[in-house]
Image: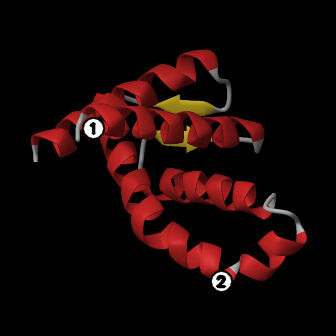
Amino acid sequence: MIGFVIRYIVIAIVVMVIPRYLKGITVDGFTVALWVALAMGFLNSFVKPVLKIISFPITFITLGLFSLVINVGLVYLVAHYITGFHVTGFIAPLIFSFILGITNSLVGLFTK
């Protein structure tokens, strides 16, 4: 349980830091960042696998590039439902999802 809390606090801190260096992403506060971290974790755990199965043919045809569209779509979905989190463009949410994925992996190494 402690690992779960630490993981999402660290990810929320990263969500707060990313908009300082990346135009196209805005976060209104730490509470919003924590909600974004939890929502992204939920979507990546439950929705993304279903989307990958459904979109397998187009992902196969595009040699995996369509998975980038799925990542961006999930960031936009979170931005739609979380008030205070705003996203514009394609590259900014793509980089945002990459940074969150890397952060999640690194924190996972240390919290197991």
Q: How many marks?
A: 2
In which quadrant is the C terminus drawn?
top left
What residue sits 78% from the left and 63% below the top?
Answer: 66
How crowded pointer 2 is (Cα within 10 Å; few <14, some 14-19, many 20+) is rated as few
Image coloring type: secondary structure
Disc 1 is placed on an element classified as: helix
Q: Nearer the viewer, residue 46 or 85?
A: 46
- Identify the image quadrant of residue 58: bottom right
Q: What amino acid is labelled 2 in the image? A: Ile
| Relative image position of residue 51 (x, y in whole percent) | 60, 75
Q: Nearer the viewer, residue 16 or 57?
A: 57
What residue sits 11% from the left and 40% below the top?
Answer: 2
- Identify the image quadrant of residue 6: top left
Q: Nearer the viewer, residue 3 or 71?
A: 3
Q: Is residue 19 left or right of residue 8?
A: right
3D distance between C-alphas at marks 2 and 1: 29 Å
Give the residue furthest to the left: 1
Decide which of tag 2 and tag 1 comes sooner along the chain: 1
Q: Which residue is mark 2?
A: 54
| Relative image position of residue 7 (x, y in whole percent) | 27, 38
What residue sits 79% from the left and 61% below the top?
Answer: 64
Which mark identifies residue 7? 1
Q: Is residue 89 left or right of residue 95?
A: right
Q: Nearer the viewer, residue 73 or 59?
A: 59
